[in-house]
Image: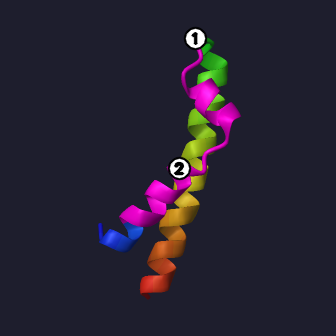
Amino acid sequence: MDDKTKARILGVIERAPQWLRNDLAAKDPAARARAEEALVAMLVDTIGESQAAAD
């Protein structure tokens, strides 16, 4: 993974909304799962953009 991709991933995590952060720490498994899925979608999109820019 190159530095540009790492920076983009860090940016996604830095900009994660508060509800996502709260739900990642929630005791409720369903809330945590939704937050995890949302974060994965955000990261996949960012990685895809990074790979497209590299092509």
Residue hosting label 1: 27
By secondary structure, the bulk of the magenta-drawn segment is best described as helix
Residue hosting label 2: 14
Query: Quick check: 53 left or right of 16?
Result: left
User: Dot 1 lies on which element?
Assistant: loop
Q: Residue at x 52, y 55 (%)?
A: 43
Query: Quick check: 17 left or right of 49?
Result: right
Q: Quadrant of residue 18?
A: top right
Amino acid type of the residue that numbered disc 2 sits on in the rendered structure: Glu
In the image, the segment drawn in magenta is: 6-27
- Residue in the foreground of this view, choosing between 13 and 40: 13
Position of the C terminus by quadrant: bottom left
Q: Earlier in the sequence, mark 1 or mark 2?
A: 2
Q: Is residue 37 above or below residue 54?
A: above
Query: Is residue 18 at all visible to an observer of this figure?
Result: yes
Amino acid type of the residue that numbered disc 1 sits on in the rendered structure: Lys
Residue 36 x %, y %: 56, 35
Q: Is residue 1 above or below residue 51?
A: above
